[in-house]
């Protein structure tokens, strides 16, 4: 059985976003994102926090 997808993978499939750079630490994340259209950034971040 294949491993289940992470929340990152699920979010990327449902809300495409160009991720230029990232740094993940135990208590926070730093992202450099490049949305294609207005409103995509907020939707992407909301989906990650679900």
Image (cartoon, rainbow, N blue to C red):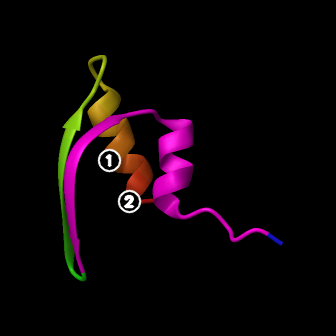
- Mark 1 is surrounded, within 10 Å at the Cα level, by few (under 14), some (14 to 19) or many (20 or more) other residues, namely few
Residue that lies at the very extreme toward the right in this rendered image: 1
Q: Is residue 5 above or below residue 20?
A: below
In the image, taking residue 46 as reference, residue 27 lies left or right, namely: left
Residue 18 falls in image quadrant: top left
Residue 20 falls in image quadrant: top left
Q: Is residue 26 above or below residue 1?
A: below
What is the number of the mark on residue 30? none
Residue 37 falls in image quadrant: top left
Q: Position of residue 3 (x, y in %)?
A: 69, 71
In the image, taking residue 5 as reference, residue 47 lies left or right, namely: left
Q: Position of residue 40 (x, y in %)?
A: 34, 28
Distance from label 1 to label 2 (Cα)?
Answer: 6 Å
Label 2: which secondary element: loop
Number of disc labels: 2
Q: Position of residue 43 (x, y in %)?
A: 37, 37
Q: Position of residue 17 (x, y in %)?
A: 37, 34
Name the residue tied to disc 2: 49
Asked whether the beta carbons under mark 1 and mark 2 sit within 8 Å of each other, the answer is: yes
Identity of the residue drawn at 32% across and 47% down: 45
What is the number of the mark on residue 45? 1
In the image, taking residue 25 as reference, residue 42 lies left or right, namely: right
Which region is colored magenta? 2-25
């Amino acid at each position: 059985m294949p491993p289940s997808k992470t929340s990152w993978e699920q979010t990327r499939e449902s809300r495409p976003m160009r991720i230029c750079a990232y740094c993940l630490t135990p208590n926070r994340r730093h992202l450099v994102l490049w949305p294609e259209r207005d409103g995509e950034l907020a939707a992407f971040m909301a989906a990650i926090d679900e």
